[in-house]
Image (cartoon, helix red, strand yellow):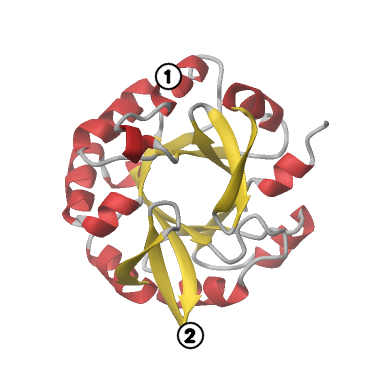
Amino acid sequence: MRILAKVDTKSEFVIKGVQLEGVEKVGHIDTILHELVGSGVSEFILSDTMASLYMRNSLISVIGRHTKDFRYPICAGGGIQSVSDATNLIKAGADRISINTYALENRSIIGSLTKALGISCVVSQIDVRKINNEFRLFTHAGRELSEYDLKSWLNFLGENYVGEIVVTSIDRDGTGRGIDWDLINFMEIESPLPYVYAGGLADMAEVRSLEGLKKMSGIAAMKLFIDGFPN
């Protein structure tokens, strides 16, 4: 099972909250990336949470600093609204790009990105919460309810392929209370594509319970790794 570090940033600082709210600075991204090396992580998902607001992704310079001596695959996102935005991250050294909010507001961007970069380089990152017994998708770092329920978005991706899906359980995010099996079971049944799950991982032993799932391609976490850093 692939283990990924899901690293959310704000102005080159790593941030972490609970249920995507009340975020606090954890440390400078250069320091955090250094701490994560050797922790068992095989890949990094980096997301600039302020990129849409400032119309500039600070990860471009971060990735540029690390690509020469950083041997881990990087998936980078935040504020992508065009092929040019995505290409800039790839040119900086990202292996793949992820898109969330803009894709849910303008889903034709998915086709434009996969045509320009290739299907394997594009990741659909989604934040999910169950409302009235239905999984719904949220935009803007989990703050705004989108028009999509999870099943309808998965149906769309079944006709407009991306390389992978990263799905975050908003209710479990940052809690360390354990993974959301309802969401995972739903993804196992409905997802047309491989997916990475994020949200609530309690410990590395819990990863073993995920072995054998047919569609899950990895699990992502951040709180678990941060809690293990020396003070």
Which image quadrant is residue 24 in?
Answer: top right
Please give the name of the residue rendered at 53% of the width and 68% of the height, measured from the top-left corner: 214
Estimate how packed mark 2 is, as few (under 14), some (14 to 19) or many (20 or more) residues with alpha carbons within 10 Å. few
In this picture, is 94 found above or below 8?
above
> Disc 2 designates what residue?
133
Q: Amino acid at mark 2?
A: Asn
Front residue of 118/144: it is 144
Considering every residue shown, the one lying at the far front of the view is 22
Q: Which mark is residue 61?
A: 1
Is the C terminus in the top left, top right, bottom left or bottom right quadrant?
top right
Q: Pinpoint residue 60: horizontal percent, then vertical percent.
A: 39, 24
Q: Amino acid at mark 1?
A: Ser
- Is residue 3 shown to the viewer in this render? no
Q: How far apart are the alpha carbons under marks 1 and 2?
A: 42 Å
- Element at label 2: loop
In the visual, does 200 lie left or right of 189?
right
- Element at label 1: helix
Say which label, 1 or 2, has the lower sequence index. 1
Q: Which mark is residue 53?
A: none
Please give the name of the residue rendered at 72% of the width and 42% of the height, measured from the top-left corner: 225
Front residue of 159/8: it is 8
Q: Pinpoint residue 116: horizontal percent, then vertical percent.
A: 19, 38
- Is residue 162 shown to the viewer in this render? yes
